[in-house]
Amino acid sequence: MIQFEDVHKAYQVAGRAVPALQPTSLTIHAGEVFGIVGHSGAGKSTLVRLINLLERPTGGRIIINGEDVTGFDADDLRAFRRKVGMIFQHFNLLSSKTVEDNIAFPMKLAGVYSRAEIRSRVDELLARVGLTDHAHKYPAQLSGGQKQRVGIARALACRPSILLCDEATSALDPQTTQSVLRLLAEINRELGLTIVLITHEMDVVRRVCDRVAVMDAGKVVEMGAVTDVFLHPQHPTTRDFVFESENIDREERQQDLAHAEGRILRLTFRGESTYKPLLGQVARDSGVDFSILSGRIDHIKETPYGQLTLSLVGGDLARAMQALDAADVHVEVLR
Amino acid sequence: MDALLTNVDWTEIGWASWDTLVMVGLSLLFSVLLGLPIGVMLFLTSKRQLLEQPVVYAVLSFVVNVLRSVPFIILLIVMIPVTVMLIGTSLGVAGAIPPLVAGGAPFFARLVETSLREVDRGIIEATQAMGANVRQIIFGALLPEALPGLIAGITVTAITLVSYAAMSGVIGGGGLGDLAIRFGYQRFQTDVMIITVALLVIFVQILQMVGDRLVLYFSRR
Ligand SMILES: Nc1ncnc2c1ncn2[C@@H]1O[C@H](COP(=O)(O)OP(=O)(O)O)[C@@H](O)[C@H]1O
Ligand SMILES: [Mg+2]
């Protein structure tokens, strides 16, 4: 478990303190995938780098698995860092070492593993990330996705309980991003590792995260379960991110709505209700005619969801809304 | 051919070449042994690096700059008393080595600093995040990552030392430079002059070629 208690951070720039993280309190639970979204410069990296103390906080307490890590001496800090893996946007692999030597590197640094232990652990990790055939290559000979897999294997070498990912998929193409995200989800599931994942794409959050914090100008402006934050964003920044991930142009959307007749509702289905043949039935029972203005059916992690914007004309509107409500559909009246 | 090279005593040339080799080899060895730690310290104590120490950096940097800005011919003369104190004579092959190191070590130190700066910051950070201490970061990440740059630096230093070694002939340093001055210059034996210069050129060419090959071999980027 990672707890921030009023943690804040200011950088010294030319003798002046420039705040990068406003006092922040949050809890990241053991075993969850916690996303952090925000625009460039919002303070995401700062927040994550405070967790393994690559940055020292200006104030506040950082408590990890019950211990205040800000009080650690140099030896304790190094031992602690071995239990926190980290992967990076630009991979940060050692270009002078082969794939297997890169993965073995943190174990060698730890100085507590035998040669045989390192050997077998490296083989195991190579198999896990699907790079057994590339063990003797140098990073320059690998594709971006393969490099990030090496990064992940390296981060897992000392069996950490936390994995920090700073824009780990931002330098990858969409397909590679998917496969890396799948690997991260698999690791989280099978090893019970806590993952803290920075991204500027809401889509990444939607695919793998359980909870998410949205950051803006050094502050966490919204935080909660991804299903809630993604389907019912409150803060303008969050809305921007959700719209962007759905490829929605706000102005076009407004124009479409302006042309529609009658009531405009947004329905949000979650879980099993997503697949029920509900709309036709409601329309028949209430005599309401509907047309679909926009819609999307997808998954948030494993949960299926659907979000439809409808215009409704005629019939018994109150009855229709009641029926939808009874079927666990979240109804918002847009107009 | 021999008619053209009437003054050339090949045994003498052979010995002088050997002396040059020894002077360059030994001074290069000591320049690297001294310059490497100085360069690493310069890098680590500089701004925004692991052991940022503005005062230490300023002092080290000043000393290096002074040694590098003094023309080598002056350094040769200034170093005479130090050399006598260190090894008892300022003449011959042995006497040339202290001034050569005084010129070569700071030169190499700067090249080390520059090549360490070329190492991606992210790699240092990743190593730090793995729980490495400063010693492990230096030997496990920084130096291996900078190896091609360091080898290129050693090559440039070696070539600089060849010309410095030749210059040390002026104060009786021995080797090809000494030969060139005593025979080629003072006795107007142009043929000796040409041979020694040709040998120096060949020597430099070989150094550069070997250095380039090694850089290529160790470049994994
Ligand atoms: N080492 C640093 N020194 C000075 N300012 C920094 C440093 N690192 C980050 N900042 C500043 O802090 C703010 C937050 O940066 P960062 O946490 O990297 O944001 P993000 O990861 O969300 O893009 C930015 O304004 C950035 O310029
Ligand atoms: Mg960042």
Image: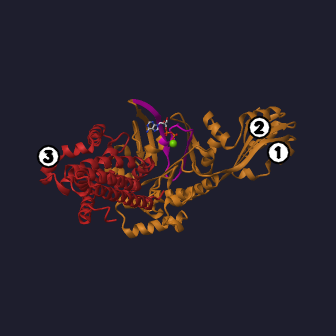
Residue position for label 3: B81
Q: Are marks 3 and 1 in contact (CB under 8 Å)?
A: no
> SS for tag 2?
strand
For the residue marked with disc 3, what is the amino acid?
Pro
User: Residue placed at 87% from the left, 45% from the top?
Assistant: A284
- Residue A151 lies left or right of residue A327; in this view the side is left
Q: Is A76 located above or below residue A291 in the figure?
A: below
Asked if A151 appears above or below A10 in the picture, the reply is below
Question: 10 Å neighbourhood of mark 1: few (<14), some, or many (≥20)?
Answer: some
**Residue at position x 47%, y 41% from top?**
A46
In the displayed structure, A112 sits above or below A19; it is: below
Chain A display color: orange
Mark sitting on residue B102? none
Quadrant where the C terminus of chain A is found in the figure? top right
Residue linked to disc 2? A265
- Foreground mark, 3 or 1, reads 3
Tell me which segment is drawn in magenta. A16-45
Looking at the rendered structure, the kind of residue marked 1 is Val
Residue A307 location, quadrant: top right
Q: SS class of the residue under badge 1?
A: helix
Query: Image point 42% across, 58% down: which residue?
Result: B212
Residue where numbered disc 1 is placed? A282
**Tag 2, which chain?**
A
Mark 1 or mark 2: whose residue is earlier in sequence: 2
The colour scheme applied to this rendered structure is: by chain
